[in-house]
Amino acid sequence: MHVSRHQVVIAGGGPTGLMLAGELALAGADVAIVEERPNQEVDGSRAGGLHPRSIEVLDQRGIADRFISQGEKHHVVHFAGAVLDASDRPSRHNYTLALWQEKIELGLAEWVSELPVQFYRGCRVAEFTETDDGVSVALDDGRSLAAQYLVGCDGGRSIVRKKAGIGFPGWDPDISYLIFEAEMSGPQLGISHGPKGLYAIGPLEGANRFRGVITEQNLERGEKPDIDDLRRALNAAYNADFSVRNVTWLSRFTDAARQAETYRKGRILLAGDAAHVHSPAGGQGLNIGLQDAVNLGWKLGQVVKGISADDLLDSYHDERHPVGAALLKSTLALTALNRGDERTNALRQMMAEVMQMDGPRKWYAARMSGLDVHYDIGHGHPLIGRRMPDLDISTADHSLTVFALLHDARPLLLNFDESKRLDISGWQDRVKVVDANIASRFELPVMGMIDAPSAVLVRPDGHVAWVGDGNDESLREALSTWFGHAAK
């Protein structure tokens, strides 16, 4: 039997899988995607936006404009029915971009098509077996693949996670929702709160076409609701079904919140919904998946190319698992605040007033936009472990931005002290060094203004691994930790 060989096989070609494939291809890895859909078409409009940090990571690769040109910018965040101004977030992209998932996927697929990525479409991963030097993967159409690593980006019901025996603990569902796209006559538009949760209906393009989400009166678990289920839910919520008809998308989801016990088990890794499922409150799922992929991609690329040891992959779990855990807690809280009983209404109104205050507002806006993520990778300067802002910089030749230097996904050492030379002998072929000037102070989300350091070492995912402290030895330690031992 013929076996196709790749360094990395990704199960699932949704947003997370596509982003990961692009990152691996930029790292020079041989990567393949297994996707059961024949193309990138999705049922319904699904996820509806990109948050600031997600737009930043796309900008780091030079592809953000492909998405920005298609979407609508909203400089606010929503908190349990309240609308909070978020236009003062310190980011070049201080807005949520309203853009349906289908267009996000198509944009990512277009980018990936320009890179050396192999697709296996119309099939799924059926079985896999870890070997001493890799993973043997059987597809459900009879084909066989071999890889050094297998990454499950195959959604909340992940086959990869289940067959790897990775636990998926969390909170069982308490309520269920129907989400739909259909024709209706005179529906009640906007958001309202019932005893169990929210009801919302909004217009779509086309005559009498609407999109809505309805909390069901009782917890339902069936994966395939029908139009009669939708009519019952509408009648219970609005005392009318608005003559709902021509349903083009109908799906059920719950407020279950679960997270994989580990994002890595040997040569098996998980990202996106395969690693964490939760209520869509806050619209975080797709965005967190993209950021999982950007954290994992460069690390896995270095490992399969022999630049870094396998244990670098442990940092993927160490950094992203806490982010996923915090996300689950946020969605649990927001889902609870969507209930419409008198006590919850009072709590929601009180919290809405609190969130209008500058401190809580800025904290919440940064949290929901992904700009506050801080990896616990060192101490000292406040930049360590945080994302490097897209500052305007000037070199001897021209003016540009930090993100423009990350398009090729290579590590970046920015030296802001013209009087000092930084020794990276042994890493010259891996790390890009740029001497530049920046403003003496700049702003970080929530933390406020900070003094510019003399130098920063920026990982390919845009997070800072080292800040200049006048100690070349600490720089070499950081280079060795994140980008392999020095070449001899």
Image (cartoon, helix red, strand yellow):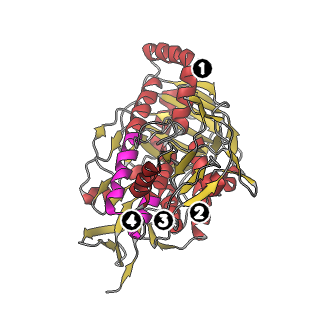
**Which label's residue is closer to the chain start, 3 or 2?**
3
* Residue 462 can be seen in this image: no
Residue 226 picture location, percent across and down: 45, 47
Which image quarter is the N terminus in?
Answer: bottom left
Q: Amino acid at mark 3?
A: Leu
Query: Mark 3 falls on what kind of element?
Result: helix
Give the label on residue 303, or none. Answer: 4
Q: Amino acid at mark 4?
A: Val
> Nearest the camera: 141 or 21?
21
Q: Amino acid at mark 1?
A: Asp
Tag 4 near tag 2, CB within 8 Å: no
Residue 147 picture location, percent across and down: 35, 72
Which image quarter is the C terminus in?
Answer: bottom left
Quadrant housing residue 354: top right
Bounds of the magenta segment: 298-324
Q: Amino acid at mark 2?
A: Asp
Comparing labels 1 and 4, the label whose residue is closer to the camera: 4
Comparing labels 4 and 3, the label whose residue is closer to the camera: 4
Residue 414 picture location, percent across and down: 59, 51
- Marks 1 and 4 sit apart, C-alpha to C-alpha, by 44 Å
Read off the residue under disc 2: 408
> At x 27% / y 60%, what residue is drawn?
266
- Marks 4 and 2 sit apart, C-alpha to C-alpha, by 18 Å
Residue 393 picture location, percent across and down: 69, 48
Side of 304 relative to 135 (left or right): right
